[in-house]
Image: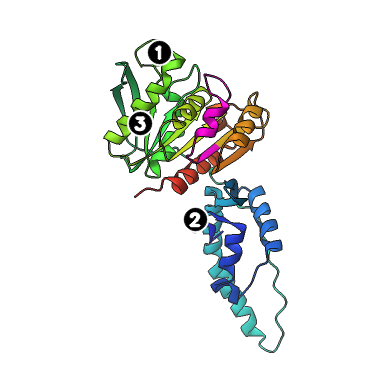
Amino acid sequence: MTLLARGPLSGYDLAQRMKRPLGFFWQAQHSQIYPELADLEEQGYVFHQVIVQEDRPQKKLYTITELGRSALKMMFLLFPALFIFAACGSASAPQKAAPTPTSVITRTPMLSPTPTLPRVPSIPVHFTTQDHVQLAGQFYGNGGTTAIICSHEYRGTKDDWSDSAPWFAAHGFMVLAYDFRGWGESKGQLDVSKQDRDVLAAIALVHSRGAKRVILLGASMGADISLIVAAETPVAGVITLSPEYLFGLSNNQIKAIFAPKLFINSQNDGFADDTQQMFQNARPPKALHLYPGNAHGVAIFETQYGQDLIARIITFANTYAPLE
């Protein structure tokens, strides 16, 4: 986990790093590394994404979770005491052969099952589309060179992101959540055929605020519209929660997207098949993750996998649109 704390790595990457300074003490084989990673993932210390690479085999990229970081800190606190204890024991019987050490990994108690939502600046904003519709939005954070634009689902509003956007902003991203035309505080009439113009206006707004790269993040309807825009407009990446083949989204548009894509859904969601089909049709780089259960769109944030989802989104953004 110490290596993963420095950044996401594949099992192969971990094996290569363990051949260097760590290899003086212990060299791990691939057959040892992957079972350990699976065990750490089961305990909630790490998670993985499947990365599809063009002309190369797909790989699993592992990332440490907040729970994993807490466990790592605990180990660092306990290690000096264990080292001193072992040293004292060996000094009292210098002639006696030391027994073979046994490594025991236990679960670290979750001191904070529901992490506290970060406190970040949040200000309302209004902006206008090219067809003169005024939209309402909410900026989170202190800005940044990478912007994450959050598009809500059908019958939703920008407030759908109020429990997740602060996490992205706390990691240095400029975050904009907004209401589609005809929804929430935005003006105009509800017209799905024109909602791509709302996303384009949001992109123009964050660029005017200093963003150099844009990640589109959408839920359900917002995911579909984000994919439609990404098929025609250069962006750094697209993250979709429970996308479906609705609201005008087609296979040709999925295939036309060159930007990296992360498809997220629940295994028993009514549109899980659509999400998996999109993943199959999309060109690399792409990744897919399905959570247990049937939560749809932003409702996944409200499940026990909410923090895992937030970590996946941040990892994706850091990988394909790193902050300067």
- What's drawn in magenta, residue-wise? 244-262
Sequence-first tag of 2 and 1: 2
Q: Residues within 10 Å of mark 3 (few under 14, many from 20)?
A: many
Q: Amino acid at mark 3?
A: Ile
Residue 23 colored magenta? no
- Tell me, yes or no, whether the two marked residues, 2 and 3, touch with CB atoms within 8 Å: no
**Left or right of 307: which side holds 270?**
right
Residue 107 lies, in percent from the top left, at: 64, 53
Q: Residue at x 57, y 31 (%)?
A: 300
Query: What's the CA distance linking mark 2 and mark 3?
Result: 28 Å
Residue 22 occupies quadrant: bottom right
Sequence-first tag of 1 and 3: 1
Query: What's the CA distance linking mark 1 and mark 3?
Result: 19 Å
Which residue is nearer to you in this view: 250 or 11? 250
Query: What's the CA distance linking mark 2 and mark 1?
Result: 42 Å
Q: Residues within 10 Å of mark 1 (few under 14, many from 20)?
A: some
What residue does disc 1 label?
Answer: 182
**Left or right of 131: which side holds 246?**
right
Quarter that holds the N terminus: bottom right
Q: Secondary structure at mark 1?
A: loop
Q: Amino acid at mark 1?
A: Gly
Q: Secondary structure at mark 2?
A: loop
Vertical order, 299 against 79 (above or below): above
